Amino acid sequence: MIRCPISSAAAVAVLVVGVSELAFLSRTELLTGLPVFQPTVDDATLVAKRRLLPRVTNEILLIGDSSCTMGLDPAVFEAAGLGRPVNLGTLASFTMPGFAALGVEALEYRPRAVVVSVLPRSFEMTEAQAREFDLLGRYLTAYGRQSPAYDLRPADRWSWFARKHRFNIFPPEFGGSFAAYAGKLDEWNGHYHERGTYAGAKPFEYKARFQPTEYCRIGLLQLADATRNRGVPLLFWWSPSPTDAVSAEYLTDASRYVDEFAAGAPDFIVLRPAPSWDPENFGSVTHLTPTAAKSNSEELAKYIHLNLN
């Protein structure tokens, strides 16, 4: 008589776990464990912004790092007669190839134009940092997307699976829950108000030399190619940096880098050189205050009127 190596009780336990896991995966949001588990702020931002994708149709799409999220207010553009742009800015941890991949996804909803708004430091991220941040790989896995700058590996798929099960406490400064945070992003069409107080750049935050990476260039090139193929205008808008956080050479080199990129990318329009503003306009080293964000949005609205028919 051959004995089964697994007892009937163990087999039942494995079956129950398997069924429970299938139910969990089928009933939770693709990237996260919502609504069972609260996500991190990085994940929450990405999930909440993707919920706004249907609004992109025939509107201006704003995309980039968190300086885009905090620094460009769709309500200001609406008041200027430019419809109501959708702000899909995420966080620096998503990196330029992530912004590009989300932009390519948004192109499926036929936006009127795409505006990339980032700080120069978003061009300095490396693939190694992206893998350490562990956001882009999980996004590509969860939503079935691709990036020419980032190849998916087994570690990305495992991390996606494991982090869907992770318990998180949503920070009170972002509303205390995903529902509260996503509700504000929904109300403000992807914009979010900076609430901090900037106390000056710390030594490790100061940028003296601009050091762009090929990883980021490939990401931006993906978006430039995709917009050109669809006949969608692609505009580039530098987010302001505090004057005490960057050198003049840093901004000059960053501006030159993107200008050179634009020279080789038809229909890519750079609207202004990388600027620096007085520190009083910032709530953090990367985010404008709500008042300064209004001014930044008004200035961009004027450039859009000049460059879009």
Image: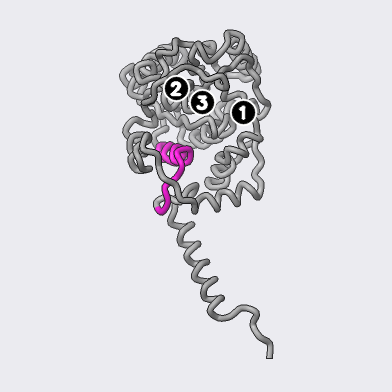
Other residues around mark 1 within 10 Å, as few (<14) / some (14–19) / many (≥20): many
Place of residue 286 in the rendered image (x, y in percent of width and height, measured from the top left): 48, 22
Secondary element at tag 2: loop
Of the image marks 1 and 2, the number of the one nearer the N terminus: 1
Is residue 41 within the magenta segment? Answer: yes
Stretch of the chain drawn in magenta:
36-52
Place of residue 130 in the rendered image (x, y in percent of width and height, measured from the top left): 61, 35
Name the disc covering residue 5, or none.
none
Give the residue at mark 2. Answer: 284
Is residue 58 within the magenta segment? Answer: no
Q: Quadrant of the C terminus?
A: top left
Give the residue at mark 3. Answer: 232
Query: Which picture quadrant has residue 57?
Result: top left
Q: Amino acid at mark 2?
A: Ser
Q: Give above or below for 6 relative to 170.
A: below
The structure residue drawn at horizontal position 36% and vertical position 17%, both measured from the top left corner, is 294
Give the residue at mark 1. Answer: 125
The answer to whether the residue labelled 2 contacts the one labelled 3, judged by CB atoms less than 8 Å apart, is no
Of the image marks 2 and 3, the number of the one nearer the N terminus: 3
Q: Is residue 221 visible?
A: no
The answer to whether the residue labelled 1 contacts the one labelled 3, judged by CB atoms less than 8 Å apart, is no
CA separation, marks 2 and 3? 33 Å
